[in-house]
Image (cartoon, rainbow, N blue to C red):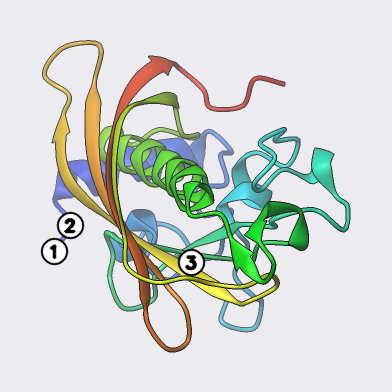
């Protein structure tokens, strides 16, 4: 259950006029703390739309809207307060062989989804209005299966550890990439905080 101190900190942000649940998620810690509303009549918003609509990341940014986009969109999981779920698919642009996406691209989307997981974890932990800027320090990837272009895929991101005792803060994230029929890849990433606010625009 949320502590009274976290509830009061989220309440302080709300009183300053901050929309503390811009993604309209029922598992946002401010909602769990009883501070922010969750509107069941409205759809959830992706973290990209809620916190960084001008994002230039080619995996999820609107600056790269085209037939070649990956279109990764990340949401808080409804059944796990600490996890995120990302949806995406690879266009033909990233085929390594006919009908087979280059497995190095799994690392690219793991980096992007993991970056969101790390920055949101730091935001929630410190009770901030916006996620901080983090950068990847390490990536370990195990490929389990092959996928084709336009195949619907998901990434589930979970936090393994957070070290925020002294700057630069670091976060370790585990990511599982799945298709409708199999586990496609598993990754573990480490991220380092490098700035106060995620958006560079």
What residue occupies the far top of the structure in this picture? Answer: 167
The residue under the point 69% across, 56% down is 70
Contact, CB < 8 Å: mark 2 with mark 1? yes
Q: How many marks do you count on the picture?
A: 3
Residue 92 x %, y %: 76, 62
- Determine the image quadrant of residue 91: bottom right
Task: For marks 2 and 1, give the CA distance.
Answer: 4 Å
Q: In this figure, which residue is indicated by the disc labeled 3? A: 25
Q: Nearer the viewer, mark 1 or mark 3?
A: 3
**Considering depth in this image, is 118 or 43 the residue closer to the camera?**
118
The residue under the point 44% across, 46% down is 107
User: For this view, does 48 lie left or right of residue 180?
Assistant: right
Secondary structure, mark 1, is loop
Q: In this figure, which residue is indicated by the disc labeled 1? A: 1
Quadrant for the C terminus, please.
Answer: top right
Local packing at callout 2 (Cα closer than 10 Å; few below 14, some 14-19, many 20+) is few
The residue under the point 60% across, 42% down is 51
User: For this view, does 27 lie left or right of residue 14?
Assistant: left
Residue 152 x %, y %: 60, 77
**Considering depth in this image, is 141 or 194 the residue closer to the camera?**
141
Q: In this figure, which residue is indicated by the disc labeled 2? A: 2
Secondary structure, mark 2, is loop
Task: For marks 1 and 3, give the CA distance.
Answer: 17 Å
Task: For marks 3 and 2, give the CA distance.
Answer: 16 Å
């Amino acid at each position: 259950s949320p502590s009274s101190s976290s509830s009061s900190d989220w309440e302080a942000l709300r009183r300053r006029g901050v929309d503390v649940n811009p993604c309209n998620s029922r598992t946002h810690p401010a909602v769990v703390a009883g501070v922010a509303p969750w509107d069941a009549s409205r759809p959830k918003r992706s973290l990209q739309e809620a916190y960084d609509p001008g994002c230039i990341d080619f995996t999820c940014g609107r600056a790269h809207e085209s037939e070649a986009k990956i279109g990764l969109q990340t949401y808080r999981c409804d059944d796990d307060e600490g996890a995120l779920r990302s949806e995406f698919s690879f266009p033909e642009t990233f085929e390594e062989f006919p009908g087979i996406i280059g497995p190095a691209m799994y690392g690219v989307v793991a980096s992007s989804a993991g970056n969101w997981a790390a920055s949101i974890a730091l935001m929630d932990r410190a009770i901030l209005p916006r996620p901080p800027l983090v950068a990847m320090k390490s990536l370990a990837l195990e490929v389990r299966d092959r996928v084709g272009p336009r195949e619907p895929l998901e990434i589930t991101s979970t936090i393994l550890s957070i070290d925020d005792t002294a700057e630069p803060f670091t976060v370790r994230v585990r990511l599982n990439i799945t298709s409708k029929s199999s586990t496609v890849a598993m990754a573990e990433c480490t991220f380092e905080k490098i700035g106060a606010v995620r958006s560079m625009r």
